[in-house]
Image (cartoon, coloured by chain):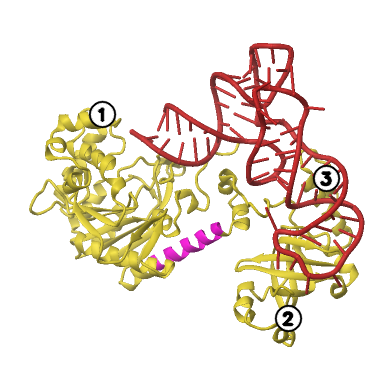
Chain colours: A yellow, B red
Amino acid sequence: MPMLESFVDRDELNEVVKNRVAKSCDLMDAGISLYPNGFKKEDDFSQIRAEYEGLSAEELESLDKEFFCAGRIVGLRSFGKVTFFHVLDKSGKMQCYAARDTLGSELYQKFKKFDIGDIVGVVGTLFRTKTGELTLDCKSVQLLTKSIRPLPEKYHGLKDVEIRYRQRYVDLIVTPKTREIFRKRTAIVREFRRFMEDRGFMEVETPMMHPIPGGATARPFVTHHNAQDHDMYMRIAPELYLKRLLVGGFEKVFEINRNFRNEGVSTQHNPEFTMCEFYWAYATFEDLMDLTEELFGHIAKKVCGTTVITYQGQEIDLTPGTWRRIGFLESLEVIGGHTKELYEDYDKLAAYLKSRGEKVIEGEKLAKLQAKLFDLDVEQDLIQPTFIYNYPTDISPLSRKNEDDPRFTDRYELFMTGRELGNAFSELNDPVDQRLRFLDQVAEKEAGDDEAHYMDEDYLRALEYGMPPAAGQGIGIDRLVMLLTDSPSIREVILFPLLKPES
RNA sequence: GGGUCGUUAACUCAGUUGGUAGAGUAUCUGCCUUUUAAGCAGAGAGUCACUGGUUCGAGCCCAGUACGACCCA
């Protein structure tokens, strides 16, 4: 194999890789294929364990049943004429045993060239070792895929977070906790979906590329459609499309998918992240509070087995019916410890924010300053689930105004563990009011706020046909997964988080 | 955008005042038929992130750059 042999001569390869390539050549010389196809895997280790772990050594001996398993060698202890090794498949690990007397010396010699990291097919019977471990006594061991790179150290595992994120495939091989997080993530999304479907919500897919970005206060990624020769924007939210579907007559819709926001990376933010947005005609934001408590309770119970969970050492009680509800301005007082004299006095508030290191832009509305005050002095103290409602109209351009006080909207944001998990409101379905709000946003954009909303004439046209009264919510799936997997960083719950390209 | 910290063998980490680059795992050789972080004996393995500076001499001190982590905005 000239290709493989030339591999060995490459000076930049480390010694371990060279050894493995040399072994691969030996195996091929002995007529062994390095990447054969066609092995029929029939049994998972976890199934085997579930079924036979309870059997005694004698019962296993009289079982006389062969199992066909496959997976990656993750541990190897050789005694010369006999070898113990652990094989990892999708369900877990199992110890396997290869003896020269069973395999025959020819096959055993070949087997001794296998390395940790190789993927093998094993066929054998079950027995129990002296120490009582359920073990597969191999009648045959077949190389299925040769691995030529060494895996990280077996005891400490992979610690370098940069390698863990860049080479997530290695992290998944060697870090059980990582596998666990992503299995849980899948379960969380599944239970989320099931909960919505059980309540009659219909899952839909709306565009990821928008001619006009909308539905959130954020900067978009820009891309370009060559054939039509115009710019497109990766969506920052699906909101305006989902509400068009309410106009179309679908009364309960939801979408679980990616949003893209052109902003910095932090432990809480990844430029592409997953949201579930749902819209419910003939419901109000108060109905959504109840639904949200049930939703979180359902998912926590299914995935964690309890509605009282621990996040970074703090006990979080997600039990439905117990969540706190508090008005936005009230929270500035009760939690933030401020008074009307500060948060209703523009100059005083601006001065305070500046003293705390916040930027205050000339001409910014009072409500925006109040939102900054909230971020500064309230948000981090919202540990237990809390709905903050009655957001100022000026910072809620898509929300229905409160009927008693139009300075505020029927909107809430959901907080826990000191961070936002959801944003919801009764929807603004008055096309004239919505047009005025858009105009207001356009003015802010012209004044220099590049996160302000764009005018969307088609969305207004849809509202002019009539959107039923409705309420809708967006819930950040990544943050929900962080919460339920006790993960301190969003990168721990995203398979391939955004990193700068390698040089 | 700002600050702090990190980058040494494939992995996990030491590295003294600035004086020949270290350990464990992994790898290779030998021994070993119930081990499980297997054991015993031996061997090999390094662009100390990168670039420049100070110095007789830099992994170590200084400056910058890259990437990453954390905190702040």
Note whether A163 is above or below A416 in the view shown. above
Note whether A29 is above or below A457 in the view shown. below
Real-space Cα separation, disc 2 to disc 1, in angstroms: 73 Å
Which chain letter goes with mark 1?
A
Residue corresponding to mark 1: A354
| Residue A451 is covered by the magenta coloring | no
Indicate the quadrant where residue A29 lies: bottom right
Would you say residue A454 is visible in this rendering?
Answer: no
User: Share a chain, discs 2 and 3?
Assistant: yes
The mark that comes first in sequence, 2 or 3, is 3
Q: Which mark is residue A8?
A: 3
Residue corresponding to mark 2: A66
**Which-is-in-front pick, marks 2 and 1?**
1
Residue under the image location 18 percent in, 59 percent down: A466
Range of the magenta residues?
A177-192
SS label for mark 3: helix
| Residue A187 is covered by the magenta coloring | yes
